[in-house]
Structure formats: structure tokens, C-alpha cells
């Protein structure tokens, strides 16, 4: 976190109407997706694109029936978040893109505040809102964080946040919480609600499709930082259900997605020594989990063994493969959550 952003409007600020393409991914969340769309009905939104990740509950059909002006990209085979958001963004041409979770609901006026804040700060490339409960109280878990380091990644792998949330290594966002009034520059606003300049996203090549369903937003923000700052805009609240995706997965499935993101991010952004530290920590934790599940949950144990294999691949500088061991056609499509 750093100094507050300049709140003054620039003389050449353009009108806010119809400048944003909103894009989100959904799967088997028909009612939630419909509610998300309903809260995107703001004058700043030029188009809404929904990528339906091979739903089987009639999500695509329901959206077309209730919101015929919304573009629905219905996938026959589910894919990762990064690939889906790239395909969705390609269908629009507005100068700004709003990426949201399907369990994030814009509070009236918040989209306008995000847009105007980004317009008024020419050195900013992205702006994230404040994720809140239904009563508009801030969800502390989703406050902005610094970019992950090998130390913070290892702390999370070892479960440090669960037993000591405000620890000095991974709990800075809780120990030194930002206030709910001041716009400031940050490394990583919540990826569940992020407004970006399309030109800069295009410049960095969009979302990295090697990611699956975790750490892809952190990677994008880190690459965007080459061209400008990201802003945390607490005056733009967005209601967030939170945990909607995780509740559909058992522990090994959730860990497979998380571990894949950790490995890919570490391979991309950490030094050789940093990669080694993360790899050894993951090797230890995944092997321990595999042993604990060996009798009661053989498929879960196999997932953790693949995670151990991924850790070895990271240590040796090899490509990181999928950890769940299933093909795209077998994978249950899910939405995405905010990377820790």
C-alpha cells in the first residue's frame, strides 16, 4: 500500500456513459448469475458478457430468456478462469473492462465511482472495489494485499493464516487495515471485482491461460504493474457472497486448484531460491496429506501425490501440469474465487 490517489478530475476526462464491458464466468449458478446481471444494469455498462462454463442447469437459456441483450458465450467443455475471461473480453470493445465474480453484486453507483476514479488517475491501470456483506460491512478477508512472496506463500501452504490470522508474514492486511474512505494505491485489490483499462490488458497479453482457478488475478495485476498502479476504492462497495465456489469442492479438489496456482505463480515470478522454498514446502504438505488420506480417500490421496509431483517439477524448472488428473470434459465447471 502506498500514498493516496489523486482525487481530482483531469480536464480531458471523457463522459462515463457506456464505457465498460462487464465480463464474468459462471457454471450451474443460474439464479446467482441472473442476480449478478441485474446489478450490472448501470449507465456506465456498454455490454455484459457471460461465459457459461458448460452448465447443466439451464443457466445459458435462462440468461437469454431474462436478459436478451446480454451476450452469452456457452462453452460445451469447461475451461479455466483465465481462458474464459479472455474469450469473454474479446467479444467487447469498450475502453474499460469490469471483471467480476458471479457472486459479486454491484451496489448502485459503485461502478460509476470505480470508473471515475480510474479516469481521474491517469497513472492507474486498474481499480478494485470494496467487498462487503449484505449490510455493507467490509469483508476483512478480501482486503487488498501485497504481492505474494515465497515467505507468504509458504505461510499459507502451512496453514498459518488459519491458526494465526494476524501473523506478521501473511496477515498484514488485517494488522494494518486500510480505512473505508480513502482511495489508495495497492499491489493487489480483490480480483473478484476489478476494473481495468482494456488497452493495458491487451498490452500484457490478457490473462495467462496457464492458470486454472487460483492466482490468475494476482499474476495479471503483477504484469499490469509494469504500466501503472492499481487502486483500492473503498467508496465503491460490492456485495460478495464469498465461498460459493469452494463449497462445491471437497478438500483435495480445492487444494488441487490452489496448489496449481501456487506452482504456476512461483514458476513465473519467483527467483530460483524462492521457487525451491515453495517447492519444498508443497512437497512436505502434499505428501503428508496423501498419507493421511491413503486409506479413506484414494482419489484424494492421488491428487496430493500429483501435487508433490508438481512441486518436483517446480524444483526442476519443468512445466506445471494439471494436478487433479482429469480431462477438461470430466472437470466440473466452477466459478472462481479471490486469490489469497
Image (spheres, rainbow, N blue to C red):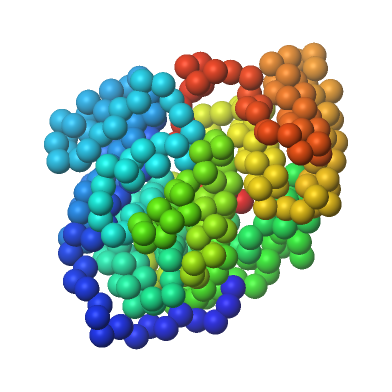
Tell me: residue 161, above or below residue 25: below
The x and y percentages for residue 30 are 31, 31
Q: Position of residue 141 (x, y in %)?
A: 58, 56
Total numbered labels? 0
Determine the residue positioned at 78% across, 30% down: 308
Left or right of residue 186: residue 18:
left
Viewer-side residue, 104 vs 213: 213
- Residue drawn at point x = 40 percent, y = 53 percent: 202
Q: Position of residue 147 (x, y in %)?
A: 63, 60
Q: Is residue 285 visible?
A: no
- The residue that appears at 15% across and 30% down in the rendered structure is 65
Q: Is residue 9 above or below residue 29?
A: below
Write down the quadrant of residue 145 in the picture: bottom right
Q: Judge whether 283 appears above or below 40 on screen.
A: above
Res 22 seen here: yes
Q: Position of residue 236 (x, y in %)?
A: 37, 66
Q: Is residue 165 left or right of residue 198?
A: right
Residue at position x 29%, y 32% in the image = 73
Quarter holding residue 133: bottom left
Quarter of the N terminus within the rendering:
bottom right
Amino acid at each position: 500500500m502506498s500514498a493516496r490517489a489523486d482525487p481530482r478530475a483531469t480536464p480531458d476526462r471523457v463522459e462515463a456513459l457506456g464505457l465498460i464491458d462487464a465480463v464474468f464466468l459462471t457454471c450451474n449458478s443460474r439464479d446467482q448469475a441472473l442476480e449478478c446481471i441485474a446489478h450490472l444494469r448501470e449507465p456506465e455498462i456498454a455490454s455484459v458478457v457471460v461465459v457459461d462454463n458448460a452448465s447443466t442447469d439451464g443457466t445459458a437459456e435462462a440468461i437469454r430468456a431474462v436478459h436478451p441483450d446480454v451476450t452469452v458465450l456457452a462453452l460445451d467443455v469447461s475451461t479455466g478462469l483465465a481462458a474464459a475471461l479472455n474469450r469473454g473480453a474479446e467479444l467487447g470493445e469498450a475502453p474499460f473492462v469490469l471483471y467480476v465474480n458471479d457472486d459479486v453484486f454491484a451496489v448502485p453507483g459503485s461502478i460509476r465511482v470505480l470508473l471515475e476514479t480510474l479516469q481521474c488517475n491517469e497513472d492507474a491501470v486498474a481499480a478494485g472495489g470494496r467487498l462487503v456483506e449484505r449490510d455493507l460491512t467490509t469483508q476483512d478477508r478480501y482486503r487488498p494485499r501485497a504481492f505474494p512472496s515465497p515467505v507468504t506463500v509458504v505461510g499459507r501452504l502451512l496453514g498459518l493464516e488459519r491458526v494465526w490470522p494476524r501473523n506478521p508474514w501473511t496477515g498484514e492486511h488485517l494488522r494494518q487495515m486500510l480505512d473505508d474512505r480513502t482511495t489508495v494505491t495497492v499491489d493487489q485489490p480483490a480480483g473478484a471485482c476489478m476494473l481495468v483499462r482494456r488497452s493495458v490488458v491487451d498490452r500484457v497479453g490478457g490473462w495467462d491461460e496457464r492458470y486454472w482457478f487460483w492466482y490468475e488475478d494476482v499474476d495479471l495485476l503483477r504484469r499490469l504493474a509494469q504500466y501503472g498502479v492499481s487502486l483500492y476504492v473503498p467508496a465503491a462497495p460490492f456485495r460478495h457472497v464469498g465461498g460459493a465456489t469452494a463449497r462445491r469442492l471437497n478438500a483435495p479438489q480445492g487444494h488441487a486448484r490452489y496448489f496449481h496456482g501456487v506452482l504456476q505463480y512461483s514458476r513465473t515470478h519467483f527467483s530460483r531460491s524462492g521457487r525451491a522454498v515453495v517447492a519444498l514446502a508443497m512437497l512436505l504438505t502434499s505428501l503428508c496429506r496423501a498419507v493421511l488420506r491413503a486409506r479413506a480417500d484414494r482419489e484424494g490421496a492421488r491428487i496430493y501425490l500429483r501435487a508433490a509431483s508438481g512441486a518436483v517439477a517446480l524444483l526442476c524448472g519443468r512445466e506445471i501440469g494439471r494436478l487433479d488428473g482429469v480431462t477438461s470434459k470430466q472437470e466440473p465447471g466452477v466459478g472462481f474465487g479471490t486469490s489469497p
